[in-house]
Image (tube, rainbow, N blue to C red):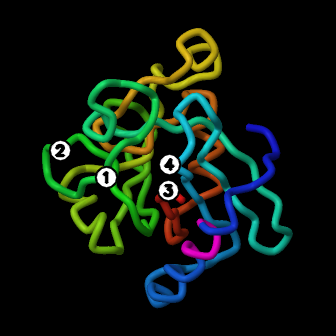
Amino acid sequence: MAESAGPPATLVRRALEAAQRHRGRIATLERVGIVDFSKPSSTPRFHILDTATGRSSAILVAHGRGSDPEHSGWLERFSNVPRSQASSAGAYLTGDIYEGKHGHSRRLIGLDPGNSNAEARAIVIHAAAYVGDRIAREQGKIGRSEGCLAVSPGDIAHVLERLPAGFMIYADRT
């Protein structure tokens, strides 16, 4: 995980507006996760923004196969429909950690109409072997999830630690 230039100002603004709408549910805005799905999957696009300092780090994150049916590496569409295998846009509240088929994972609660089915769809943060720098270099893209925010096995512990339960993640494109 490297320091990044940060997420686009447009997404930061939208994330902070979402945080205001959902302020009763979010424990803190100390750090916010911002996923910039306007970038290709080969680019670190999951930013963890320290709101006090403005510093951020960015890592690779997969989008759903239903969002990129031809596997171009670019998110083409969002969906909140069950079994769509697509990524959803909007604000998420980070939930509890659990041990699942991908190891340590974190539940996500969709806060907006565009991701309100996140829990029912089992949209979570988890590690996946199909996400990594080597894959991005060799294939020009990383693998796709079923709508989850899948990160590399080397990044999952950092993400779970930096975005504990009660924090917010905002996913969208510019």
Question: Who's the residue at 48% across and 58% down the image?
Answer: 171
Which residue does the numbered mark 2 point to in the structure image? Answer: 84
Q: Are marks 4 and 1 in contact (CB under 8 Å)?
A: yes
Residue beneath label 4, please?
A: 37
Q: Quadrant of the N terminus?
A: top right
Q: Earlier in the sequence, mark 4 or mark 2?
A: 4
SS at mark 2? Answer: loop
Residue where numbered disc 1 is placed: 78
Q: Secondary structure at mark 4?
A: loop
How many residues crowd around disc 1 within 10 Å: few (fewer than 14), some, or many (20 or more)?
many
Mark 3 or 1, nearer chain start: 1
Which of pointers 3 and 2 lies earlier in the amino acid sequence?
2
Q: Residue at x 28, y 37 (%)?
A: 146
Say which of 115 and 31 sits in front: 115
Residue type indicated by callout 4: Phe
Instruction: From this view, report whether residue 62 is shown above or below residue 159.
Output: above
| Tag 3 residue | 173
Image quarter of the C terminus: bottom right
What amino acid type should be assigned to the residue bearing mark 3? Arg
Please report the bounds of the magenta region as a residue range: 11-15
Q: Is residue 13 magenta?
A: yes
In the picture shown, does residue 98 fall above or below 108?
Answer: above
